[in-house]
Amino acid sequence: MHTSVRQSPDGAVERPDRRQRSIARRPGYPLLLLLQRMTSELEYYGARMRRRAGVRRTDMHAVSAVVEAERRDEEMTPGRLGTMLGLSSSSVTALVDRLCEAGHLDRGTARSDARRVALHANDTGRRVAAELFDPLDHALMEVFDRYTPAELELFGRMIGDITAATADAGGPVRANGSATANGSARNGNAGNASTGTGAVPVDGLPADGRARDA
């Protein structure tokens, strides 16, 4: 089996197991493990809610991205959406076609350039997004209510930095297109953008949507 290696700044070859041991000795390592666990729980939550709503993973991310862009008063074009989701041009076109046909999104004219298409969430799309995320939003707000404004401000800065670092770390994957992003080459979720809507097998979960024991 081939073991990947990496050169450290001083030119020495650094093996993955050595890098991992080095990370484990750093003060923030317990937080890293908690973030990994939280990410898994968010994936399980999303999988259960997608199954309940009968939408695909990529559909959920697409509708959420458009709703979030509108919340920020930003325009979401098909090209920008494809970049965010790591989809090829043909895949994002099929995805947008499907979501518009399903009544979740509408096409319009971009404010910045009348020749470009902008995507908008309609009432159905916003309702789907609310059904997917409202239970989690309420649960998390109850947690936030336990902390002081100063603690929440610090947490907000940390989450902002963590989000930016995650986006930067995944940048090369997104730049490579749909072959690796969102697991499309492994599970076909993004690659199946041209197929019909409806419930699909949930990534990493058995049929009842519950997380398997480790």
Image (spheres, rainbow, N blue to C red):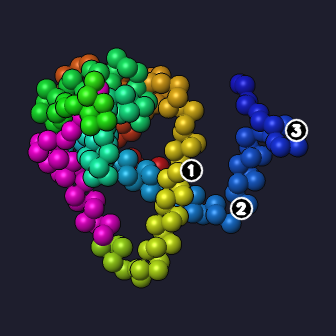
Residue 59 visible? The answer is: no
135 falls in the magenta region:
yes
Question: Residue 165 bears which disc, if any?
Answer: 1
Q: Quadrant of residue 197?
A: top left
- Frontmost residue, 14 versus 75: 75
180 falls in the magenta region:
no
Which residue position holds label 2? Answer: 26
Which residue position holds label 3? Answer: 11
Residue 83, position as x, y percentages in the image: 42, 31
Residue 42 visible? The answer is: yes
Horizontal side of 126 relative to 161 (left or right) equals: left
Question: Given this view, does label 3 or label 2 mark the residue nearer the observer?
Answer: 3
Q: Write the start and end of the magenta stretch as one range.
A: 116-141
> Which residue is found at the position 21% from the left and 38% from the top?
120
- Frontmost residue, 145 versus 72: 72
Question: Residue 154 bears which disc, if any?
Answer: none
Residue 203, position as x, y percentages in the image: 36, 36
Question: Height in image: 203 above or below 185?
Answer: below
Asked if the residues shown at circle 1 and circle 3 are in contact, with their CB atoms under 8 angstroms apart, the answer is: no
